[in-house]
Image (cartoon, grey):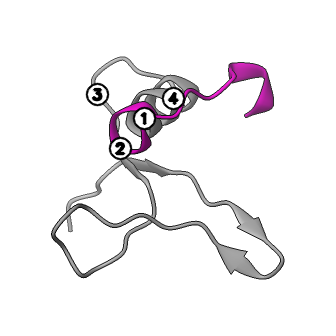
Amino acid sequence: MKEIDKIAYIHTEQGKVLMSRSKGKTKYYIPGGKREIGETDEETLIREISEELNVKIIPSTI
């Protein structure tokens, strides 16, 4: 079985999980994605969240 390296941002608050839904879609997903060659966990998370949610993560808060 092939291994897929992915990073996800899971935020919970008051028993609820932050999820996202693409415009025009009905399914929700947890934000994140695949690492690009040479990226660290932090770099991948920052890039993916910026791309998917248009949110800038402060690296020191990871």
Residue under label 1: 54
Q: What amino acid does circle 4 point to?
A: Ile
Q: What amino acid does circle 1 point to?
A: Asn
Most foreground residue, 2 or 34 = 34
Question: Mark 1 and 2 residues: CB-CB less than 8 Å, in contact?
Answer: yes
48 relative to 3 in the view: left or right: right
Residue at the spot 52% in from the left edge and 34% down from the top edge: 55
Note whether 33 is above or below 18 in the view shown: above
Q: Earlier in the sequence, mark 1 or mark 3?
A: 3
43 relative to 57 in the view: left or right: left
Q: Within the image, what quadrant is residue 10 found in? A: bottom right
Residue under label 2: 52
**Mark 4 and mark 1: Cα distance apart in space:** 10 Å
**Mark 1 and mark 2: Cα distance apart in space:** 6 Å
Q: Earlier in the sequence, mark 4 or mark 2?
A: 4
**Mark 3 and mark 4: Cα distance apart in space:** 12 Å
Nearer to us of marks 3 and 4 is 4
**Mark 1 and mark 3: Cα distance apart in space:** 19 Å
| Element type where label 2 sits in the image | helix
Q: Which mark is residue 46?
A: 4
Nearer to us of marks 4 and 1 is 1
The x and y percentages for residue 46 are 51, 29
Callout 1 crowding tier (Cα within 10 Å): few <14, some 14–19, many ≥20:
few
Most foreground residue, 25 or 33 = 25
Most foreground residue, 35 or 45 = 45
| Element type where label 3 sits in the image | loop
Q: Which residues are magenta?
A: 50-62
The x and y percentages for residue 61 are 78, 30
Residue 33 colored magenta? no
| Element type where label 4 sits in the image | helix
